[in-house]
Image (cartoon, helix red, strand yellow):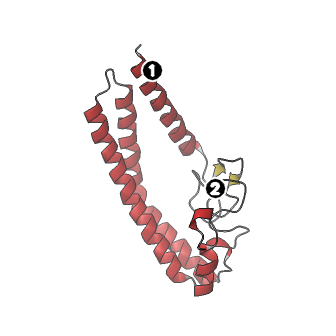
Amino acid sequence: MSDKVKILSAIALAAALAAGSASAQAPQDGPGCGPGMMGGQGMMGGHGRGMGGPGMMGGQGMMGAQGRGAAGADLTDEQRDKIASIHESNRRANWGTMGELRGEMFKLRGLYNSVPADAKTLVEQQAKVDELRRKMLASRLEAHKQVEQVLTPEQRKQWRGFGPWWMHEE
């Protein structure tokens, strides 16, 4: 086997393992997005629980902890219900897109394993995956905006104070 094929195979294997690991996790309870980047074993040893528990580096997730919802802001029952409804609507809206994305990623992994790997076809397939990811990102950003509208100005300020250090305002 040539070095190029070995490298492409290693990349495909790493991508498949990463995707398989994320999809194999059982859904987490509590608020947030469930398993994946924010759930399960975190990058730096923390265990996530949706966006409501400990974060990737062992600290708090973006949505706060101990059931306090949107980044630790104390929510009313009405706010909690509205935010849950926004998340559920977003999940339903993206369910088909997520299935399509997984299918396109499966095709991409297959292309990485083809001998010889066709660069043009790989780039075209990657573009399909990227477009579906952009579509889901736009939906998540819209849901984020809807959640912000449910919060009071003080809660929004608290919400923006959580998350990665680079998101904090000076």
Instruction: Judge whether 78 appears above or below 32 on screen.
Output: below
In the picture, measured across the screen, residue 39 lies left or right of residue 130, that is: right
Residue 17, position in %: x, y? 53, 35
Q: Secondary structure at mark 2?
A: loop
From the image, which quarter does the N terminus lie in? top left
Does residue 69 appear in the picture of this structure?
no
Q: CA distance from mark 2 to mark 1?
A: 36 Å
Q: Which circle marks residue 6 in the picture? A: 1
In the depicted structure, whether residue 5 falls above or below residue 93: above
Q: Please identify the quarter of the rendering in which residue 62 is found.
A: bottom right
**x, y percent for residue 29:** 65, 59
The residue at the point 39 percent across, 41 percent down is 105
Disc number placed over residue 28 in the picture, else none: 2
User: Who is closer to the viewer here, 3 or 121?
Assistant: 3
Q: Amino acid at mark 1?
A: Lys
**Callout 2: 10 Å neighbours few (<14), some, many (20+)?**
some
